[in-house]
Image: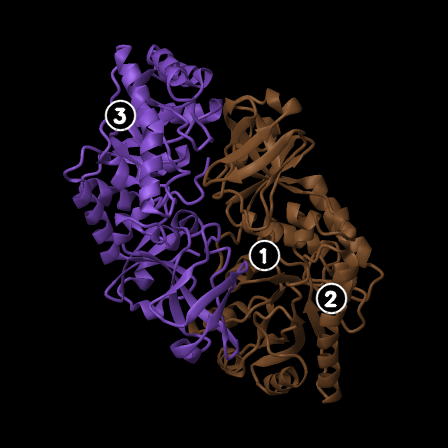
Chain colours: A purple, B brown
Amino acid sequence: MTLFSNEIVGKPLDEVDTPALLIDAGALERNIARIAAYLADKPARLRPHAKTHKSPIIAHMQLAAGAVGITCAKLGEAEALVEGGIRDILIANQIVGPAKIARLVRLARYADLAVAVDDFENAQQISDAAEAAGTTVRVLVEVNIGMDRCGVEPGQPAVELALRVAELPGLRFFGLQGYEGHLVGVPERAERERRVRAAMEQLIETRRMIEAAGLPVAAVSGGGTGTFDITSTIEGFDEIQAGSYVFMDAWYRRVEGPDTAFEPALFLWSTIVSRPAPDRAVGDIGLKTATPEHGLPTAFGISGVETLSLSEEHVKLRVEGEARSLRPGDKIRFVPGHVCTTVNLHDCYVVVRDGVVEAVWPVAARGHST
Amino acid sequence: MTLFSNEIVGKPLDEVDTPALLIDAGALERNIARIAAYLADKPARLRPHAKTHKSPIIAHMQLAAGAVGITCAKLGEAEALVEGGIRDILIANQIVGPAKIARLVRLARYADLAVAVDDFENAQQISDAAEAAGTTVRVLVEVNIGMDRCGVEPGQPAVELALRVAELPGLRFFGLQGYEGHLVGVPERAERERRVRAAMEQLIETRRMIEAAGLPVAAVSGGGTGTFDITSTIEGFDEIQAGSYVFMDAWYRRVEGPDTAFEPALFLWSTIVSRPAPDRAVGDIGLKTATPEHGLPTAFGISGVETLSLSEEHVKLRVEGEARSLRPGDKIRFVPGHVCTTVNLHDCYVVVRDGVVEAVWPVAARGHST
């Protein structure tokens, strides 16, 4: 449901009805400042991933703190960011098919876009459309560094594609992208570092080969919240596409590393709707307001509440100790299991500072998966 | 993204960009007719659950086929249904807190609402608000029949709450609700039937006790797509809240029973965006367009495609046989793993008949979890 900011701004949080998606404004600001401070003396720059927040206002906060540009996953997200005044946008995926390519080159009139490619024919179609529209689009060759999803193989296959793509008149060759998504959640710090360095070495070696062939590489881009402290120190690695750090979530908090210095800044605000047994309470969040794939939401700011299960509109809780006093109508906060997909279920953020609603921000790119 | 019906209606499906949520109009109509025919000679009536489709137009199709009213999970869904002209609505959950109760009694001026209660204080608050607004709200006492979520215990506790609630001036006691949600997916038909009958017997016995105390019970309501063929034959069971049958999904198709006679009527329309290896393809659906909690989406209408994993905006596929010929840009259909939560990710349905787009319908109650 849409919340009307004129009715809610200035009210205490307790008066906000549930379920609602809350941002702790102070925690958000501290997370943004924290990664900026961490990266200030490192060679790599931050290109934060907007798939997490889908919000131009948060993207502007990240740019103001020093980010070099914004990453997003989808053309529809890029459209929402451009509408919100963002200029330098890397769409970290393939843009495939004539309908989307036509939208891409139109959007390129209003922003400096970059897209990933892993197929020459696709690159040629984008080049043709850009040329016809009198514009150009930056491209990164996506390289498979072990995640086995998209991307050409590192080394010679990637070099060949880069050299061919660089010849296309509607494109500007921008560099390489490799995502170590299979490694961002390796729990143990030392093992994660060893494996990330090995994966990234393939990307850096491919960069050297392309440069040796006479083609400049402006950017090597990749990485996430679980690995930025590793990738940011790798020579030849330029841009970190971390997203979740801005909000943190229960899953990333289990991953050992300096990233755990980030605070939870996103919460699900929930009402207890049933107290059918002394040790059982039921809240009004569920699979339609919170996602389960990285683990269940966890209660925050109250002890003795254990999340047992999510169904579509219910969360079942085991309660003990102080939580036994919970009654129907009481409200509590949860930290989402996975912020990126949880945000995509909600139309707006209720921004709270010192217990008072400060703003309502739309999740501008919610559902923009096209 | 919003699809503009004036641009898409009448076009062939192949021209619809992806990801998109498709309805096969013929399959939808046949599923609605099929359950109506099945229940025609049974004592129980159908009150289909709109949490699945969140669409007034589909609710009207169900009513036209003989449904006695509509079920929904949330007050926000009921608001969208009332806006779409639906009158008889059972909200199968507790409505808790002054903000929601105020909305409930206002909505009751435009529709005949029923809500579940499992707490006397909550019932009293609804009664007070309804009385003050000069209206009444029907209530069902929710009974825990083994799912251990909401609901008072069967027998004496439920009878006591029913008798107290029936005295409240703003309420009309309507009956009992019990949801066998822990049993709808028991795969083996005979075991499912045995356990469902045992659970429902507690509900029917509670009904008899309430009637013996002199309070008429208008309706005993519950049930789902996995159990309607069992509950519909139980003496004293009145209303079946089945939802998923209208679209079916990959999960329910694994549950053995006459329900498997339903056809898949809902599909995810997806483009292949990468073919990085002979046995690997990547499509453009993911966790932001399809939900994983009941299993992954499965390819439909093409052989040799196995779904390996979903990430936020990607589905990773193993391809063999005819599917090896898939190229970036080709489009294929998937059956969702869980229709109810998948629908909630999308703003609209693209309705297709004989390969041509016939309509675009909003998912009117998408995100209406308040």
Nearest the camera: B348 or A316? A316
Q: Are marks 1 and 3 in contact (CB under 8 Å)?
A: no
Q: Amino acid at mark 1?
A: Lys
Q: The disc numbered 3 marks a residue on which chain?
A: A
Q: Residue furthest left?
A: A41
Is A266 displayed left or right of B51 in the figure? Answer: left
Mark 1 = which residue?
Answer: B51
Kindly identify which numbered label has been placed on residue A295: none
Kindly identify which numbered label has been placed on residue B196: 2
Q: Is residue B74 visible?
A: yes
| Circle 1 or circle 2, nearest the eye | 2
Is A355 displayed left or right of B249 in the figure? Answer: left
Nearest the camera: A306 or B334? A306
Q: Are marks 3 and 2 in contact (CB under 8 Å)?
A: no
Measured in 3D between alpha carbons, the distance from the residue under mark 1 to the one under mark 3, in whole angstroms, is 47 Å
Q: Residues within 10 Å of mark 1 (few under 14, many from 20)?
A: many
Q: Amino acid at mark 2?
A: Val
Measured as percent of width and height from the top left, residue A120 is found at: 43, 16
Measured in 3D between alpha carbons, the distance from the residue under mark 3 to the one under mark 2, in whole angstroms, is 61 Å
Q: Residues within 10 Å of mark 2 (few under 14, many from 20)?
A: many
